[in-house]
Structures are given as C-alpha cells and as structure tokens.
Image (tube, coloured by chain):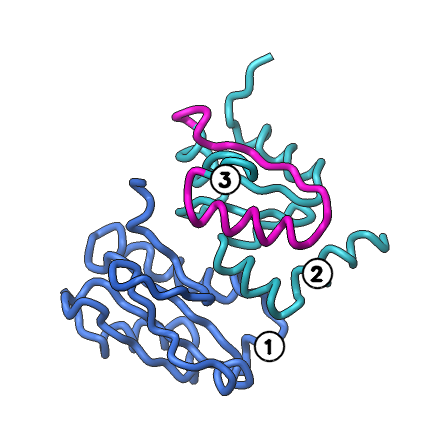
Amino acid sequence: MSFNWTPEELQEIVDNNNIVLFMKGTPEEPRCGFSNRAASVLNELGQPFVSVNILTDPRAIPSVCAWADFPTMPQIYINGELIGGSDIALEMYESGELQQMISANESK
Amino acid sequence: MVAEQWVVEEVLKVIPNADISVTDLHKSGDHFHVRVVSPEYEGIRPLQRQRPILNHFKKFIAQNIVHALDLKCMTPEQASKSGETAFDPHGGDVEFFGVHIRREKRSE
C-alpha cells in the first residue's frame, strides 16, 4: 500500500495518534535544528509520539504545508490539533500548557 | 518596501486596541519583528493568536511586499515578564524562545 500524502491520509494520522510530529529526519537522527528542538520537547513530555519524516518523499513538504495551512516544518499535532512549530512547542512546554493538554487527554 | 508604521496599521485592522511595536530587522522594509500585546489573547493558544494576523498578511507576503513576519503575540502579563523579543534569524546565534514564522527556512 502506498502513502500519497493526501489530506485524508494526513488527517487520519493526526486523528489516530494523540501526539504527532512531522519533522525533517527522525527523533534519533534529526536533519534540522528546529526539528531536533521539537522532538526534544516531545521527548521531555515522556509520552509516546508518532513522528513522520517528511524528507522521505519530495511530495511531503508541499502536501503537509498546504493541508495544514502552515508554512514551515516541523509541525506538532496534539489531539488532532496543530499546535505549531518548535518555538511554540517550547514556549508552551515552558509555560506548562503542553503538559496540561496532554494530561487533559489522558483523563478522557 | 513598507514602513514600520504601515505594519502597525495593518495589524491594528486585525486586532484593534492592541499594543503593537514593529522592528524593521534589516532596515530593508520587508522583514519585520512584530510584538503584539493584547488582553484578548488571554486563554488563546499561541498559534491561534497568530493565525488572524498571518491570514491578513498572506496577500502581502504573496505579493512580496513583506518577506517575513516574526510574530510575538502576548497577553499584558506575559509582556511584563518578557524582555526584548526581537529576533533576527539571519543575525547572530541568539537562542529565541518565542513565537515566530521563519519563512526563509522554507527552501532549506
């Protein structure tokens, strides 16, 4: 089965996983400082998350950016909602908002 | 090329009564740090604070009137605790923990 980065396929990923990170590379081998920072913030949360390496397919970046209406990578989704990139993630982590969002989801 | 005051007025169309300060980062009239302080941001997540402003500026970015908007949207309480927020992604190696869009990273 092939993955074609359609809006339906992308939506399915964020609907089926509480925390999703679209990034350049992998959390173990990030290919961009901003992606590394986003993955580090999610690691700090201590919850499992799904990461999608958007460097594996040249169609990925334009498809994800158009679907998300967000111009840059990485992109973090929590409970199906786009949170933003690594700077917003770090800001929300430092203020505790990110932890709140995740614990709110756990208690459901 | 536009002036800082033009940016202030355009942002005011989106969020009237906000306290707005704009820095022309390269004195090139197209790359701005925009600090927006409003009590209306209380309880609204960072990305959702930026969205209306980004949507308003989309047409100016598409026309190349504005190249980059580095947005920092804060409540008055956050603003009172934060120091200097201007960040130049082409400048020195300043670590920045705020909210901004790095459009120039797109081609990376």
Frontmost of labels 1 and 2 is 2
Give the left or right position of residue B46, taking residue B23 as reference.
right
Q: Looking at the image, which residue is at 57% across and 50% down?
A: A40
The disc, 3 or 2, on the residue closer to the chain's N-terminal end is: 3
Q: Give the residue at mark 1.
A: B42
What is the chain identity of the residue bearing mark 2? A
Dot 1 amino acid type: Glu
Q: Give the residue at mark 3.
A: A23
Dot 2 amino acid type: Gln
Q: CA distance from mark 3 to mark 2?
A: 21 Å
Task: Give the chain coloured blue.
Answer: B
Q: Which of the 4 image quarters holds residue B43?
A: bottom right
Q: Looking at the image, which residue is at 50% across and 67% down?
A: B49
Asked if the residue under mark 2 is in contact with the one under mark 3, i.e. CB atoms within 8 Å, the reply is no
Rendered hue of chain A is cyan
Q: Looking at the image, which residue is at 60% across and 47% down?
A: A77
Q: Looking at the image, which residue is at 67% across and 41% down?
A: A49
Q: Position of residue A34 (x, y in %)?
A: 44, 49
Give the left or right position of residue B17, taking residue A95 as reference.
left
Q: Position of residue A21 (x, y in %)?
A: 57, 42
Residue B100 lies, with reference to residue A48, above or below; the image says below
Circle on res. A99: 2
Q: Nearer the viewer, residue B30 or A6?
A: B30
Q: How many C-alpha atoms fall within 10 Å of the one at disc 3: few (<14), some, or many (≥20)?
A: many
Figure quadrant of the N terminus of chain A: top right
